[in-house]
Image (tube, rainbow, N blue to C red):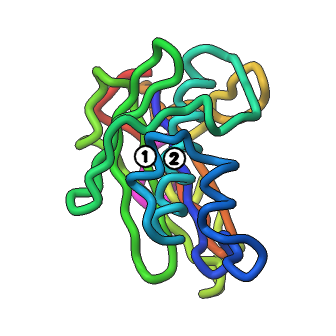
Amino acid sequence: MIGIDIIDLSSSFDSSKYSLQAYQGRILNTSESSFCDTFNDLDILWAIKESTYKCYFRETGNSFLSPKKILVTFMDKKNGTFYTRIGTHFYKGRFYITSEYVYAISVGIHDRIDLMRVYLRDRKEGSDTCTEFDFFFQTGAPQASFCHHRTGFPESIRLGASEYPYSRSHHGSFFISVIAPGQDN
């Protein structure tokens, strides 16, 4: 089980429309506001919540619209690690931030996050014609194909005879996908 989310910082939360506190009130639980001092922190928390939601949905098939149902219980800004939960479902992950984007990867609490392969494309640099399959064919992967969840989105990738958890996201000019080659689906 795996989930990923990316945020293009050039088109994220608009500080001219609402204050940081107004956005916090819509997205964060009271306990999470201690992790959020800046708009960049809010972007990180949003990416964490979105990647966690994708894990949860793959695990349960249940969807919901309230980001407050996802509780970030721990976030280490220095090391880029976090723990989250949705009800009785627990997750962990890592986040990465640059001057252009932030992305977060969530996995189940017992899954290994150190085995992930992340593929990032910046469509501003002319790579918008690159498809997801190109990521895998460029690496010489035999017979790459996607296996779809009953709702239609790809949840795993088949490389040759093996199948691995998969997730993808896009925002602004960035597209990102991740596979977990060390874990069976």
Q: Is residue 158 rendered magenta in the image?
A: no
* Side of 167 where 141 appears, left or right: left
- Precedes in sequence: disc 2 or disc 1: 2
Mark 2, residues whose alpha carbon is within 10 Å: few (<14), some, or many (≥20)? Answer: many
- In this rendering, would 173 be left or right of 161? right
Q: Please provide percent x and percent y for residue 90.
A: 40, 22
Residue 105 image label = 1
- Residue 16 or residue 135, whichever sits in front: 16
What residue lies at 44% left-to-right and 21% top-to-bottom? 185
- From this viewpoint, is residue 125 visible? yes
Q: Do the residues labelled 2 and 1 touch (CB within 8 Å)?
A: yes
- Give 106 or 41, whichever is nearer the viewer: 41
Can residue 167 be seen here? The reply is no
Measure how far apart labels 2 and 1 are at the Cα level.
4 Å
Q: Residue 59: x, y in percent?
A: 55, 18
Percent x, y of residue 82: 33, 43
| Magenta region | 137-142
Q: In which quarter of the image is residue 78?
A: bottom left
| Residue 174 in which image quadrant | bottom right
Give, as a three-letter code, the residue at label 2: Ile
Q: In this view, does 43 lie above or below 73?
A: below
Please, what is the three-letter code of the amino acid marked with disc 1?
A: Ile
Please tell me whether residue 53 is drawn above or below residue 79 in the rendered image.
above
The disc placed on residue 4 is 2
Please indicate whether residue 5 sits to the left or right of residue 14 in the image. Answer: left
Element at label 2: strand
- x then y, percent, for residue 33: 47, 51
